[in-house]
Image (cartoon, rainbow, N blue to C red):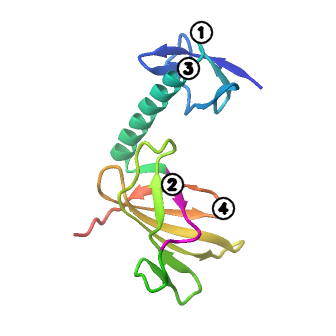
Amino acid sequence: MSTTHYENQGGLLVKPGTNECAGYILNFDQHGAYDPTGKAQTPTGPSKDEVDAHNAILAQAEREAMIKSGIGTFYISESRAPKCTPENPRWRIERNGGFTYTNATVTQFTGAWKSPWCYVRRGYSYGFCRVETRWVWFTGPDGLKWYGVNKGNMDCFTGRRMKRQGK
C-alpha cells in the first residue's frame, strides 16, 4: 500500500510543491485516512477536522463544476422496501414488468448536496446482456432538471442537465 504525503493549504490537502489535491478522503478511526491512491499523511495526521474541511471544499468545487458544465457524477440510494403501497401514486407497476417509484435519493459522494426531487423508473436494458437499469430524473445542483441512467448494481451514475427544461 502506498502512502501519499500532503500539506494543508487553506483547508485543501495538496501534494507539497504542486497544485495536485487529494481526492475525497475517508477517515477511519484508529486506522488513518485514505484517499483513492492509498494512505494519506500530513505532518500532523490528518485530523478528522482536516479531512472534513478538505472533503467540503472538494464537494463545493465539484458542485460548481457540475453547474458550469451540465454534467457530473451522482449517487443514488433507495429503499428496496418502499414505505408506500401500490395504491400510492409514488409506486406503480409498469406493463413491461418494471416498476416506478420516487423513494430514491440522488446525492453527491459526500452527501453535501441532496436533490430535492427524484423520479426513478426501473426495468431492464437489452443488448449484449440483460441488466437491471434505473432511469433517473432529478432536480440538479443548479435547480434545473437533470437525467441519468444507472445500470447494474452500482450506485453511481453520470447525470446531465436536460436540454429541454419544460415549464
Whole-angstrom CA distance, mark 3 to mark 1, is 10 Å
Q: Which residue lies at the image location 62% right of the left edge and 76% below the top edge? A: 124
What residue type is disc 3 on?
Ser
- Above or below for 63 versus 56: below
> Does dot 4 land on a helix, a strand or a loop?
loop
64 drawn magenta? no
CB atoms of marks 2 and 3 within 8 Å: no
Left/right of residue 167 with respect to residue 34 in the rendered view: left
| Residue corresponding to mark 4 | 153
The earlier-in-sequence mark between 2 and 1 is 1
The local crowd at label 3, few if under 14, some if 14 to 19, many if 20 or more residues have their Cα within 10 Å, is some
- Nearer to me, 39 or 88: 88
What residue type is disc 1 on?
Pro
| Residue corresponding to mark 2 | 158
Q: Position of residue 66 (x, y in %)?
A: 39, 45
> Does dot 2 land on a helix, a strand or a loop?
strand
| Residue corresponding to mark 3 | 47
Left/right of residue 130 with respect to residue 134 in the rendered view: right
Q: Position of residue 4 (x, y in %)?
A: 66, 19
What residue type is disc 2 on?
Thr
Whole-angstrom CA distance, mark 4 to mark 2, is 15 Å
